[in-house]
Image (spheres, rainbow, N blue to C red):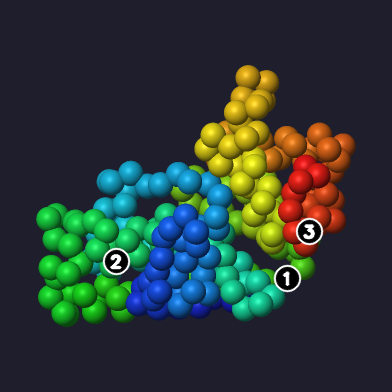
Amino acid sequence: MKIELHEITIREIAKGYIDNAEEGVKGYGGLLNIRPKYQREFVYDESKRNAVIDTIVKGFPLNVMYWVKNEDGTFEVLDGQQRTISFCQYVNGDFSLNNRAFHNLTATEQDEILNYKCMVYFCEGNDKEKLEWFKTINIAGEKLTDQELRNAVYTGEWLTNAKLKFSKSNCAAYNLANKYVNGSPIRQDYLETAISWINDNKIEEYMSVHQHDHNANEL
């Protein structure tokens, strides 16, 4: 397992920031998948979002973040999603703090925010190594579920298609089985249950076998 600590500025992370239904949420010049399509959709409330910006403005450290480094050189955020979205939205002009939007700041104030350095761990390795490492991370804030950790490892077309069916608010699986299945599709409970049923509770084995399938129709 290879884990490297990097200092990356908000300027770099916010470069090319987009947030839409087609592309998901991306930044870092298009290389960082901040919130892959159909991933958990919870968002910070206003007070938590503002606290992120206030921390940056004061020059205080944000908690370390973790990115998964993919074989093609792209990245996915494992931990730090909402912090990243918060400062990207602020720089993008999506909200203001104390009645001051980013464009209301002086050039010096803008540069102080853009040059703020985030501490980011790049994590890469084989599937088993990554899953074991992710389970040991002391993730601040709302912890990832076991299935969310698996999703961070077994990325690809199959997972994206499976999330569309099992992990979206009011997805097909929820509308069909919400009276019979406990949990939340957004927290990946429905996806976990479906894989468990189809493969005798051997979830990681099933995801490994089907990771590179083009769709999740079998599931």
Q: Is residue 181 left or right of residue 79?
A: right
Question: How far apart, in angstroms, are the residues tagged by discs 3 and 1?
Answer: 21 Å
Answer few, some or many: residues within 10 Å of disc 1's Cα (few below 14, many 20 plus, some between 14 and 19): some
Q: Residue at x 54, y 34 (%)?
A: 170
Residue 181's spot in the image, x, y percent?
67, 25
- Which mark's residue is nearer the viewer, 2 or 3? 3
Q: Secondary structure at mark 1?
A: loop
- Which residue was labeled with disc 1? 125
- Which residue was labeled with disc 3? 213
Mark number displayed over residue 174: none
Question: What amino acid is labelled 3 in the image?
Answer: Asp
| Towards the viewer: 121 or 180 | 180
Mark number displayed over residue 92: 2
Q: Is residue 28 left or right of residue 109?
A: right
| Towards the viewer: 39 or 123 | 39
Q: Secondary structure at mark 2?
A: loop
Question: How far apart, in angstroms, are the residues tagged by discs 1 and 2?
Answer: 33 Å
Q: Residue at x 78, y 42 (%)?
A: 219
Residue 26's spot in the image, x, y percent?
47, 66
Question: What amino acid is labelled 2 in the image?
Answer: Asn
The quarter of the rendered structure image containing the N terminus is: bottom right
- Which mark's residue is nearer the viewer, 1 or 2? 2
Residue 59's spot in the image, x, y percent?
27, 69
Question: What amino acid is labelled 1 in the image?
Answer: Gly
Question: How far apart, in angstroms, are the residues tagged by discs 2 and 3?
Answer: 36 Å
